[in-house]
Amino acid sequence: MAAHLGVRYATVSEWAKAFAATGLQMLVDKPRSGRPLLIQPADRARLTALACSKAPDGHSQWSLRLLAGKSVELGLCARMSASSAHGILKKTVVAQLDC
């Protein structure tokens, strides 16, 4: 099994132990440590859609600062910096989208 999946034998052994202890419950993600997301995935998708929409009057394209401000204005989040908007868009690979 380990060779077929390209993992170590110890990994398969841990999976077997977890399955024996909890059954299919082992497949459910457990809460992770760290700071929770301030902007939920649905709102991140709205920011991406906004970036692909027509720029506001007087602008040829969306800037990160404009996107951040509009996100707050639309209530997607309480506050957002241009660098936060950049991080969200970078993760969604907006540069490769056909907007």
Image: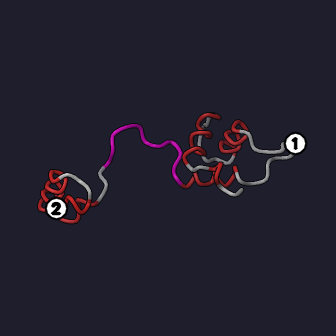
Which residue position holds label 1? 58
Residue at 43 percent across and 42 percent down: it is 36
Residue 91 vs residue 48, the one in the foreground: 91
- Choose top left, top right, bottom left or bottom right for residue 5: bottom left
The reply, left or right, for residue 94 in relation to residue 33 is right
Q: Secondary structure at mark 1?
A: loop
> For the view shown, which residue lies furthest in the front direction?
3
- First along the sequence among labels 2 and 1: 2
Mark 2 to mark 1: distance in Å? 59 Å
Q: Is residue 86 magenta?
A: no
Residue at 63 percent across and 50 percent down: it is 94
The reply, left or right, for residue 4 in relation to residue 10 is right
Q: Quadrant of the N terminus?
A: bottom left
Residue at 33 percent across and 40 percent down: it is 33
The disc at residue 77 is none
Q: Nearer the viewer, mark 2 or mark 1?
A: 2
- Choose top left, top right, bottom left or bottom right for residue 85: top right
The chief SS type of the magenta part is loop
Query: Could you tell me the amino acid type at mark 1?
Result: Gly
Compared to residue 68, the image places residue 50 above or below, namely: below
Q: Which residues are magenta?
A: 31-41
Which residue position holds label 2? 19
Q: Give x and y (percent) for residue 82.
A: 65, 35
Query: Could you tell me the amino acid type at mark 2?
Result: Phe
Query: How many neighbours does mark 1 have within 10 angstroms: few (below 14), some (14-19), or many (20 or more)?
Result: few
Q: Give x and y (percent) for residue 10.
A: 15, 51
Q: Give x and y (percent) for residue 19.
A: 16, 61
Q: Secondary structure at mark 2?
A: helix
Q: Do callouts 2 and 1 mark residues in contact (Cβ within 8 Å)?
A: no
> For the view shown, which residue lies furthest in the right direction?
58
Query: How many neighbours does mark 2 have within 10 angstroms: few (below 14), some (14-19), or many (20 or more)?
Result: some
